[in-house]
Image: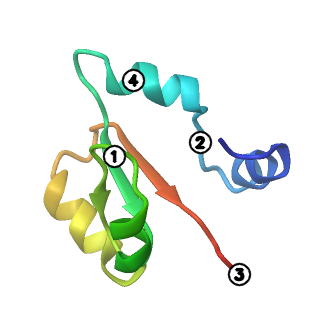
Amino acid sequence: MSTDSEQSVAAREGVPTISRDELAAALSSDHPPALFEVLPVGYWKKHHLPGAISAPPEQAAAIISAQVPDHDADIVVYCWDPG
């Protein structure tokens, strides 16, 4: 779940956010979004959300585009900045 400050930054930048509960409901729906984790491979292998597709930062755009060719499809992208 993102913090209030993270949600505030995302909202200012036009990036919609989703809560844990909203994500859980969306993933259990009849038409779940594609779920991607934009993390280095090592982090993804160690800890990732069930069903998430690995999309390392340097390859994320290509992987997501290849996996979800429908530009109107719902997707959820999880990322974390360890720095």
Within 10 angstroms of label 4, few (less than 14), some, or many (20 or more) residues?
A: some
Residue under pointer 1 = 35
Mark with earlier residue (1, 2): 2
Q: Position of residue 26 (x, y in %)?
A: 39, 23
Mark with earlier residue (3, 4): 4
Label 3 and label 1: CA atoms lie apart by 23 Å
Residue under pointer 2 = 16
- Residue type for callout 3: Gly
Dot 3: element:
loop
Label 3 and label 4: CA atoms lie apart by 30 Å
Label 1 and label 2: CA atoms lie apart by 15 Å
Circle 4/circle 2 CB separation < 8 Å: no
| Residue drawn at 30 percent across, 79 percent down | 59
| Residue drawn at 16 percent across, 56 percent down | 67
Mark with earlier residue (2, 3): 2
Residue under pointer 3 = 83
For the residue pair 54 and 42, the one nearer the viewer reads as: 42
Residue 81, above or below 37: below
- Residue type for callout 4: Ala
Residue under pointer 4 = 26
- Residue type for callout 2: Pro
Within 10 angstroms of label 1, few (less than 14), some, or many (20 or more) residues?
A: many
Label 4 and label 1: CA atoms lie apart by 10 Å
